[in-house]
């Protein structure tokens, strides 16, 4: 259940950006070399929305700008249970595999590289995550976003099954 958001309705100024990877490609021509750059950018509001984007240009700054614009167009909402995720999940994108487990309050964000950047900008502060398989930042980032998209809350599952939640007087939902 991936929800996408429009940047005009959400206010693009509240989003933070982080560059995960910049790649340089060169083409040899008669006058020398032509360089082009690609940038993998993650953007999020640290309140449950995150997106990734990929930009290509002849200058690094333009590639980062294009990646940021693409990331803001592809925002998804992260289902959260307090400061962590609702359940354990493992996702795969090509050779990149990511495993994420919910953690108790105060544990912190235990993740590395691209997974850490995505979860940090999503606003998840207590989680155990591990990148398995490929260390390619693009595949790891896509696997992380796929895992976030596969997360479901208890309310989502009850709604899908048509079950109403009955709350006792002394319990919180």
Image (spheres, helix red, strand yellow):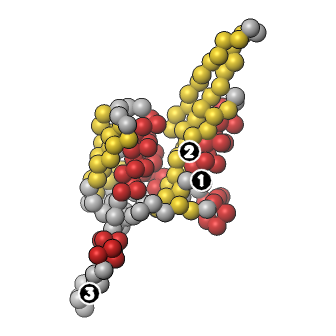
Q: CA–CA distance between discs 1 and 3?
A: 38 Å
Pointers 2 and 1 in contact (C-beta within 8 Å):
yes
Residue 49's x, y, as percent?
50, 59
Nearest the eye: 72 or 95 = 95
Secondary structure under the numbered disc 1 in the rendered image = helix
Which residue is under mark 2? 53
Secondary structure under the numbered disc 3 in the rendered image = loop
Using the image, determine if residue 84 lies above or below residue 71: below
Q: CA–CA distance between discs 2 and 1?
A: 8 Å
Compare marks 2 and 1 and give the one earlier in the sequence. Answer: 2
Q: Is residue 102 left or right of residue 123?
A: left
Residue 150 picture quarter: bottom left
Secondary structure under the numbered disc 2 in the rendered image = strand
Residue 41 picture quarter: top right
Which residue is under mark 3? 166
Q: Residues within 10 Å of mark 3 (few under 14, many from 20)?
A: few
Q: CA–CA distance between discs 3 and 2?
A: 41 Å
Nearest the eye: 82 or 166 = 166
Q: Quadrant of the N terminus?
A: bottom left
Q: Quadrant of the C terminus?
A: bottom left
Which residue is under mark 1? 72
Compare marks 1 and 3 and give the one earlier in the sequence. Answer: 1
Q: Is residue 24 left or right of residue 157?
A: right
Pointers 1 and 3 in contact (C-beta within 8 Å):
no
In the image, what residue occupies the spot 32% across and 40% down?
97
Residue most toward the bottom? 169
In the image, what residue occupies the spot 34% across and 77% down?
159
């Amino acid at each position: 259940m991936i929800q996408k958001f429009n940047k005009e309705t959400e206010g693009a100024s509240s989003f933070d950006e982080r560059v995960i990877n910049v790649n340089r490609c060169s083409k040899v021509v008669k006058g020398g070399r032509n360089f082009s750059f690609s940038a993998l950018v993650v953007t999020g509001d640290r309140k449950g929305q995150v997106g990734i984007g990929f930009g290509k240009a002849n200058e690094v700054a333009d590639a980062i700008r294009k990646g940021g614009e693409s990331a803001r167009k592809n925002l998804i909402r992260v289902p959260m249970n307090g400061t962590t995720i609702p359940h354990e999940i493992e996702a795969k994108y090509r050779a990149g595999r990511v495993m994420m487990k919910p953690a108790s309050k105060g544990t912190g964000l235990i993740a590395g590289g691209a997974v850490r950047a995505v979860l940090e900008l999503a606003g998840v502060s207590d989680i155990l995550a591990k990148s398995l398989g490929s260390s390619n930042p693009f595949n790891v980032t896509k696997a992380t976003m796929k895992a976030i998209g596969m997360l479901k809350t208890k309310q989502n599952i009850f709604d899908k099954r048509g079950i109403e939640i009955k709350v006792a007087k002394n319990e919180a939902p």
